[in-house]
Amino acid sequence: MRSLNLHLKVLITLLVGLGILITAYQIFILGIPLTEDETDDLWNIDARVEFQASPREPVKLQMFVPPLNQDYVSLNESFISNNYGVSINRADGNRKVTWSARRASGKQTLYYRLVLTKRYSGEQTKSEGPIFRDSIPVEGAEKIAAEALLAPIRQHSADVETFISETIKRVNNVNDDNVKLLLAGDASTPNKADAIELLLSIAHVPMERVHTIRLAADVQQSPELWLRSFNGEKWLYFNPETGQQGLPTDRLIWWIGDDNLIKLEGGKQAQVSFTLSNSEMNAIRLAKLTDENTDADFLEYSMYGLPLSTQQTFQIMLVIPIGVLVILILRNLGGLQTLGTFTPVLIALAFRETQLGFGIILFTIITALGLSLRSYLEHLKLQMLPRLSVVLTFVVVLIAAISLLSHKLGLERGLSVALFPMVILTMTIERLSITWEERGGGHAFKVAIGTLVAATLSHLLMSVPQLVYFVFTFPAILMILVGFMLAMGRYRGYRLTELFRFKAFLKD
Amino acid sequence: MLGLWKTWKALEAKGIMGINRRNADYVLKYNKRNLYPIVDDKIITKERAIAAGIDVPEMYGVIETEKGIDKLRDIIGDRPDFVVKPAQGAGGDGILVIADRFEDRYRTVSGKIISHEEIEHQISSILTGLYSLGGHRDRALIEYRVTPDPIFKSISYEGVPDIRIIVLKGYPVMAMLRLPTRQSGGKANLHQGAIGVGVDLATGVTLRGTWLNNKISKHPDTTNSVDGVQLPNWDGFMKLAAGCYELCGLGYIGVDMVLDQEKGPLILELNARPGLNIQIANDCGLTHRTHAVEARLAELAKKGITETPEERVRFAQELFGHVPKAEI
């Protein structure tokens, strides 16, 4: 007995532990949303390229597109173009699309569309970058200006990070004569970036240009220039205008480097405009989409991998253990008397088809009428099978009559009775009448009420949408249920009703 | 909530056994499933008992097929009274008790006159499984009619009172006298309204009783006191009950016995899931007693001894008997 107990304890611990572990893995590592209502932002980015094609000349247009190795996951990417060949190639951490056509004339419009989301990205790869560079050669006045600027920067900085931000601050101080000389009257951001690069190169600090798009809906924008530098551990991002450090979370890196966004051969007046829009999407649907578009197969082996119609069946099936658990608790802890063990669960399932209120009324009427028929049949002393057949036929006729009646009365509910509840009703009537004969009418009534209560409770619990979603998404939770059921199997305490039944002991 | 918790603790302190404990610690632990047919089928029980030399009401005959019904007259012979029972019936359904013959007809205990054909129809119904649990085909059993000892006249209403003793591994742990009432329709089942009266295991003197989960001391129909009655031949009952362990092999059973006017204690049937109301009848919990028996068994197992039914009865009587009289 003791070894059996140990065995059981180990088994329960194992099941519960495994269940919790798997569920936690799904929630925390895979990031599967806890409820169905969770939504995520979905960004729709359109880049529209327009240019004037030169007649009788092959056209070749190259444009950078996001490298997609960051926090964002692309769900869909499309290149929309008439009779242009499209090819994509990667170089130096950038991605470049090349549209090409042998012949084109007039105004040309090409689209690039990207749908992406921030969730469910794979793990970050360890970043690497240069930490040393050669100086850009400068001479004369510019050299002196640069050195004049660098002296206080060196003084005011402690490391690469502060050095860069200090440099940016100095360059943005346009009243400084040295800065004026370096910028040569052009205070645009790219020119500032050139000046910053020059200063940093003298100090052998490498720097890269980063072109970003802001994820903001309905705003006209063009790629924004940021600077970044590798400090040996990670990339540091700087705004060349303000010296602000750190890339805001709503920025998407489009390309890196000194090149222009597009390079056009065989055309002119190339223009790119960006349009962004965002929509919210159901998190679990998003997860499914992400799953299809990345190589993270975390939903492949879950219930979502099944065909849709099968999924619906399983959504019902997987909550049945919860209904059973309700019956188990009501019977073994509460002491509620029900008809058979699982009849209440079956009735609860039947309630799915008929709705609760109507189901209870239907159940009561048909059972009452069926019982009276059964008690009449009792006088005829029939054998079990013929008797059951008669009751079943009677139930069918009764359901048909009720359906017809309620249809004529305009209650469409009556038609909701499916095949499934019929057999359950027949069995209920049969068992109830046996109980009636063996234990008396009062007991039968008590049992019938108990069955209805248990069925109603488990139906209510089984139709909580959050619960259905949870069990369906995290089926490992059933292992925890089994653990609990196993523990209940060795429960020896009193049932709630026994506390009242044995009250006579406490009267002295 | 707090009140319920207090009730719980108080019941636990008194050693009251609940259904969950009975099922987990006794029925599931000591009663092997494959032995159930021995107690579920009254004919098998009887055959086993006869083979073991345990007293049961004499079996006149068994009818197994429709064809066998023709033998009914041979089986009855010219006996004036007999009982027809389904072998696997439950709750006393389908039992026909013939008290006397009248001309060529029969008179039941309730005074109804029935013909031979009606008895044959009853047997046919039994064979088709009308009274058996689950509607399986059944066998009909024709046996000796028990005449209750006149001692019960004053505290019983119709029917046959019976004595139930709970036996754990051959050790009687608690006993109860079950008295039919008007409400129970002459049946001795507690949930049908019969009275349960506790019995002192050592002396066979009745204690107070239980009726519908309440404690009582008088019979509701006869208004006579049910306590303080000395049951005759008590040691015989105890020995009979203790011997049932060897008979069926089930470790936790309720043994139902009757006291016949002429033949003394007889075993009626065995029950593999005896009810818990016996505790109210005795005003005593089962758990302390079963634990004492289990401790004794462990002790004996260490020494490698097994006790005879007589020794087991003596142990139980010494330990559980001589209940101090309840103060009223």
Image: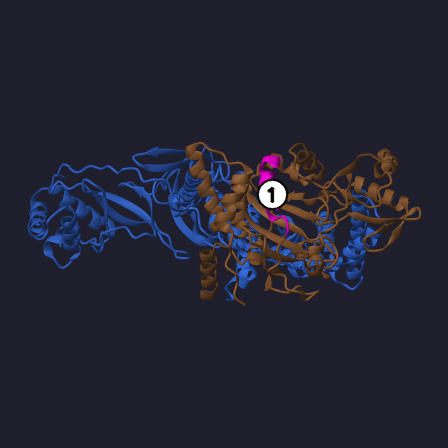
Q: Residue at x 56, y 60 (%)?
A: A501
Is residue A12 magenta-colored? Answer: no
Q: Which chain is brown?
A: B
Q: Is residue B267 left or right of residue B107?
A: left
Q: Label 1 belongs to which residue?
A: B241
Q: Which residues are magenta?
A: B232-249
Local crowd size for mark 1, using a 10 Å CA cut-off: few (<14), some (14–19), many (≥20):
many
Q: Residue at x 78, y 58 (%)?
A: A369
Q: Nearer the viewer, residue A38 or A452?
A: A452
- Give SS at disc 1: helix
Q: Nearer the viewer, residue A347 or B216?
A: B216
- What shade does chain A have? blue
Position of residue A328 measured from the top left corner of the image (x, y, whole percent):
55, 50
Residue at the extreme right: B103
Q: Is residue B301 left or right of residue B255?
A: left
Position of residue A97 measured from the top left corner of the image (x, y, whole percent):
40, 37
Where is A472 relative to A460, above or below?
above
Q: Amino acid at mark 1?
A: Ala
Is residue B234 magenta-colored? Answer: yes
Quarter of the image for residue A233 reads top left
Which quadrant does the N terminus of chain A fall into?
top left
**Whether residue A491 is visible:** no
Q: Nearer the viewer, residue A7 or B90?
A: B90
Main SS, magenta residues = helix
How many marks can you see? 1
Q: Is residue A94 left or right of residue A359?
A: left
Q: What subunit carries mark 1?
A: B
Q: Nearer the viewer, residue B179 or A478?
A: B179
